[in-house]
Amino acid sequence: MNFDFSEEQDLLREQARRFLSERNALGRARRQQDAGGGFDAELWREMAELGWLGAALPEAYGGAELGYVDLCVIAEELGRANAAVPFASSVYLAAEAILRYGSETQRQQWLPKLVSGEVVGAFAAAEQPGPLTADRIRARVAAGKLNGQKSPVLDADAADLLVVLATNGQDLGLYLVETTTNGVSRKSLGMQDDSRPGAAVVFEGAAVEALTESDGWAAYEDIQNRAAILMAFEQIGGAAACLEMARDYSMERYAFGRPIGSFQAIKHKLADVYVATELARSNAYFGAWALNAGAAELPVAAAAARVAGCNAFDLASKENIQTHGGMGFTWDMDCHLYYRRAKATGLALGSARVWKDRLISRLESRNTA
């Protein structure tokens, strides 16, 4: 079996990296932070024109139908560039939910708009601090109307369409809600990474349309598993960028007449980051295969990729700051942008601790079956 990327995928990676570098995605993310937050609408439009927003979606809905491995390649480059776009919310979560669980009418209505960037999607599940479980969902649908609150909802300020996890009598379901409809209000929340802002969304008799009226929790976990693998690639890209920043600085910064990179204390830090990043990459590659093949190993692969990705990006962002020393903590350096993103991605789908528990449970179930 060939586990390497194809020539076409290597070319896609090269083109994506060049595009994001030429557009100065990192500098634009900094400007978004300086301006008080929000996503980069211009960069989002250009990405839509390149077909990235529909990379894995069927051509029948306006997508490029490249496959999930190609989407993983794009995700890694977005993480490396620290792009300020709602890619995860709109592509990994909202579009995937509609593709897998929507009716043909819903797919025809919404997927082309998500692919073109005309509509930005987001996924609303959490309602309170702590791990999300089925019995903690209080948002309720009755007679086609939704009442309740979701918080935080990543990229909700930018979203035109929400996929909401809510109860319907005794069942949990997934529902589509347009943010411009009556009965929907949003309140921006202070986030560590303001280039990926979150909001509290309140529903007061908002009209909804069902994706699934039953088995909503199973659908939610399926979507999370798939998104976790894609987000792991973003985290690997961010970790690799942090490692490169720390390495370059350690070769330029002199202390006691020597580059600080020649000292064992720095070498050990960078070696630890390299090992963690490559371990995460290995798990993410397994996840990419499982995602693209629709393999039964997907839940285990997703949990492993998620845990390793969170650990690698968290470690790399911290050690990058430490390697830069006192300068690393300042606003003028780019280190804090990756640190903020590491924290944001580490919580976006549930913390690493939650995914560790899932991994252990799934391995135990598999081994005792």
Image (cartoon, rainbow, N blue to C red):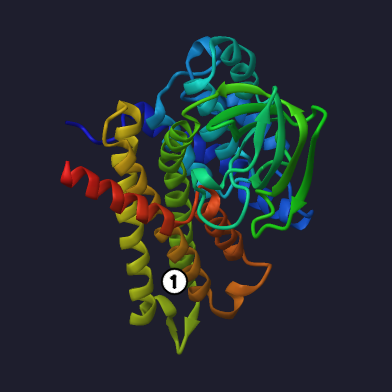
Residue at disc 1, secondary structure: helix
* Front residue (pair 245, 183): 183
* Front residue (pair 127, 108): 127
Q: Is residue 120 visible?
A: no
Residue 290 rendering spot, x and y as whole percentages: 30, 34
Q: Are there few (<14), some (14-19), or many (20+) residues within 10 Å of tag 1?
A: few
Residue 53 rendering spot, x and y as whole percentages: 56, 28
Find the residue positioned furthest to the right.
182
Q: Is residue 252 visible?
A: yes
Q: Is residue 356 left or right of residue 227?
A: left
Residue 333 rendering spot, x and y as whole percentages: 63, 66
The residue positioned 65% from the left and 45% from the top of the image is 153
Quadrant location of residue 326? bottom right
Find the residue positioned furthest to the bottom.
256
The residue positioned 45% from the left and 60% from the top of the image is 244
Kindly identify which residue carries mark 1: 251
Q: Is residue 360 left or right of residue 37?
A: left
- What amino acid type is highlighted by mark number 1? Met
